[in-house]
Amino acid sequence: MKDKVYYTPQEVSKALDIEPYVLRYWETQFSFLKPERTKVGWRRYTKEDISKVILIKRLLYDEHFTIKGAKRRLKELRKDGELDLKAVFEETRKENIFVEMRTALEEMLEMLKGG
């Protein structure tokens, strides 16, 4: 993705491998995801908006939350009424590392049992 101030929904959906209709749906479900609109009504995403989309995608696709569960998780992660994206990414990264480690250890255990 080129480094610029605003991105179109098509650019965001292509870069993040999400269908454009999914992106529109998430905007209706997650109140904190509100991309700016041009004078003619076209949506345009900032880097912060894209960070929010990445977070939503992680919660739904990687951590397998439902929409309702993801909303609840986001509420838990809010800090002083505002979502701290940097902290959320760090926490999500740590959680994913532990999940990956556990999976690798379980696979090694299975190999040891079988051999």
Image (spheres, grey):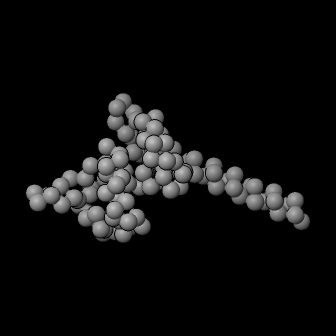
Whether residue 48 is visible to the viewer of this picture, yes or no, is: no
Compared to residue 107, the image places residue 83 above or below, namely above
Q: Residue furthest top?
A: 80
Q: Is residue 45 left or right of residue 62?
A: left
Indicate the quadrant where residue 104 lies.
bottom right
Q: Is residue 91 left or right of residue 35?
A: right
Residue drawn at x 45%, y 42% as measured from the top left: 68
Indicate the quadrant where residue 47 lies.
bottom left
Q: Quadrant of the C terminus?
A: bottom right
Horizontal and vertical percent for residue 75? 42, 36
Compared to residue 29, the image places residue 41 above or below, namely below
Compared to residue 66, the image places residue 11 above or below, namely below
Horizontal and vertical percent for residue 14? 36, 69
Horizontal and vertical percent for residue 44? 23, 59
Residue drawn at x 30%, y 68% as measured from the top left: 11
In the image, 100 versus 27, the foreground residue is: 27
Q: Quadrant of the N terminus?
A: bottom left
Q: Is residue 75 left or right of residue 32?
A: right
Residue drawn at x 39%, y 45% as measured from the top left: 85
Whether residue 106 is visible to the viewer of this picture, yes or no, is: yes
Residue drawn at x 36%, y 52% as measured from the top left: 26
Q: How many marks?
A: 0
Horizontal and vertical percent for residue 16? 40, 64
Indicate the quadrant where residue 78 lies.
top left
